[in-house]
């Protein structure tokens, strides 16, 4: 843990519980980015072939890391952009199921188009209500965040697998931005048809990189009109034969941005996603127990068996200021204070948070 923490200068000046806002950059990534830009400064267009290789290697790494065929990986600058491109390829007026207070970039793109929308509030047993809604409302598309941004509510991924088995024609679209990188994830086994992720949070890659993952056989389901020379690999003969994932890459891509994503995936692999997952799950259990004992969690969170690395504490600006005054970096979200732990947060961070909270009441 000490060796890992040394990679993150930010951790030396505060208790950083804000990965849900931004994943801190780290020394070895900055070294790589500086070398990349120095090469661009000295060699200019001579680096074009290296740029293509970096982008190709990034797609390959994403596919390996999340278990998705390379051909199903699209590089996008952020989830919001990818989601809007995706919905341009969906037939209008389809029946869509969304979750109340989900991240705006999940819900708003549907709401701004001509879809028939059903919205469900989140409760401790809401998976059962999802199954009922899918049948009763004849739902065609279910879109959701795996982890809710406001309070860290974690959807049961085993339920998603069953939902897909029971409803094979249901198109399942997920936002993994607050999940991927915090815990292990197998896309092929998930039952999810389309997964979108921004890389600047739990993937520690800075702004301007993300990806979309596509299951097989979606070419007839999603007819994206987006096009461009890059999507055709710079080949005029490919104009009419672009794969679905390539249509999300119509123009040139940044080797700095997406090379940073690959570098961070390699970094996470070097630590081990099994170890990261176990650490984060253990911290989640400890924090849930401690916050619940103080009466600071909502009932629909307390009643769930599994939770994410994000918690929303029932407190206001006064407590938030106390946390800030004690060098705890977190965020006001919804009706409370949102804290988020990652693998570089140890028991010292946990104990500091609880100690300050106990002195705030």
Image: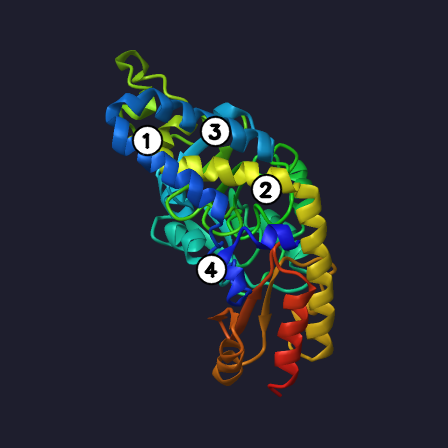
In what element is the residue under mark 1? helix
The reply to whether discs 3 and 1 touch (Cβ–Cβ < 8 Å) is no
Residue 233, image x, y percentages:
33, 19
**Tag 2 residue:** 268
Residue found at x 43% / y 32% = 74
Disc on the earlier residue, 4 or 1: 4
User: Could you tell me if residue 276 is visible in this image?
Assistant: yes
Contact (CB < 8 A) between labels 4 and 1? no
Taking 242 as reference, is 130 left or right?
Answer: right
- On-image quarter of the C terminus: bottom right
Secondary structure of residue under mark 3: helix
- Select label 1 or label 2 by which is in front: 1
Q: Residues within 10 Å of mark 3 (few under 14, many from 20)?
A: many
Task: Mark 4 vs mark 1: give the one in front.
Answer: 1
Q: Earlier in the sequence, mark 4 or mark 2?
A: 4
- Nearest-to-viewer mark from 3 and 2: 2
Mark 3 lies on residue: 59
Q: In the picture shown, does residue 314 fall above or below 47?
A: below
Q: Which residue is mark 1?
A: 39
Closer to the chain start, of discs 3 and 2, is 3
Q: Position of residue 9 (x, y in %)?
A: 49, 57
For residue 21, the mark is 4
Mark 3 or mark 1, whichever is nearer to me? 1
- Give the mark, 4 or 3, whose residue is nearer the N terminus: 4
Name the N-terminal-most of marks 3 and 1: 1
Q: Which of 338 and 7 lies nearest the eye of the viewer?
A: 7
């Amino acid at each position: 843990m000490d060796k890992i923490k040394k990679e993150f200068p930010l951790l030396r000046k505060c208790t950083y519980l804000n990965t849900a806002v931004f994943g801190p950059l780290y020394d070895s990534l900055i070294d790589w980015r500086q070398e990349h830009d120095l090469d661009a400064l000295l060699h200019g267009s001579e680096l074009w072939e290296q740029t293509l290789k970096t982008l190709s290697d990034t797609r390959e790494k994403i596919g390996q890391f999340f278990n998705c065929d390379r051909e199903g990986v699209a590089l996008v600058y952020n989830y919001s952009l990818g989601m809007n491109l995706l919905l341009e390829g969906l037939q209008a007026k389809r029946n869509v199921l969304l979750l109340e207070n989900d991240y705006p970039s999940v819900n708003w793109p549907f709401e701004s188009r001509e879809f028939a929308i059903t919205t469900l509030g989140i409760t401790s047993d809401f998976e059962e209500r999802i199954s009922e809604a899918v049948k009763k409302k004849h739902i065609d598309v279910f879109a959701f965040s795996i982890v809710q941004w406001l309070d860290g509510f974690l959807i049961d991924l085993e339920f998603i697998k069953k939902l897909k088995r029971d409803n094979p024609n249901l198109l399942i679209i997920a936002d993994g931005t607050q999940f991927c990188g915090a815990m292990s994830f197998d896309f092929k086994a998930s039952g999810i048809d389309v997964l979108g992720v921004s890389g600047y949070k739990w993937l520690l890659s800075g702004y301007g990189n993300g990806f979309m993952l596509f299951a097989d056989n979606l070419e007839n389901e999603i007819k994206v009109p987006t096009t461009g020379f890059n999507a055709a690999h710079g080949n005029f003969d490919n104009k009419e034969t672009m794969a679905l994932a390539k249509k999300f890459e119509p123009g040139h891509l940044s080797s700095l941005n997406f090379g940073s994503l690959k570098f961070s995936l390699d970094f996470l692999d070097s630590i081990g996603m099994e170890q990261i997952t176990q650490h984060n799950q253990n911290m989640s259990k400890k924090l849930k127990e401690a916050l619940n004992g103080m009466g600071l969690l909502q009932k629909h969170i307390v009643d769930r068996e599994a939770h994410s690395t994000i918690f929303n504490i029932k407190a206001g600006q006064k407590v938030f200021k106390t946390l800030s005054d004690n060098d705890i970096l977190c965020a006001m979200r919804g009706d409370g204070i949102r804290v988020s732990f990652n693998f570089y947060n140890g028991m010292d961070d946990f104990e500091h948070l609880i100690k300050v909270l106990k002195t705030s009441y």
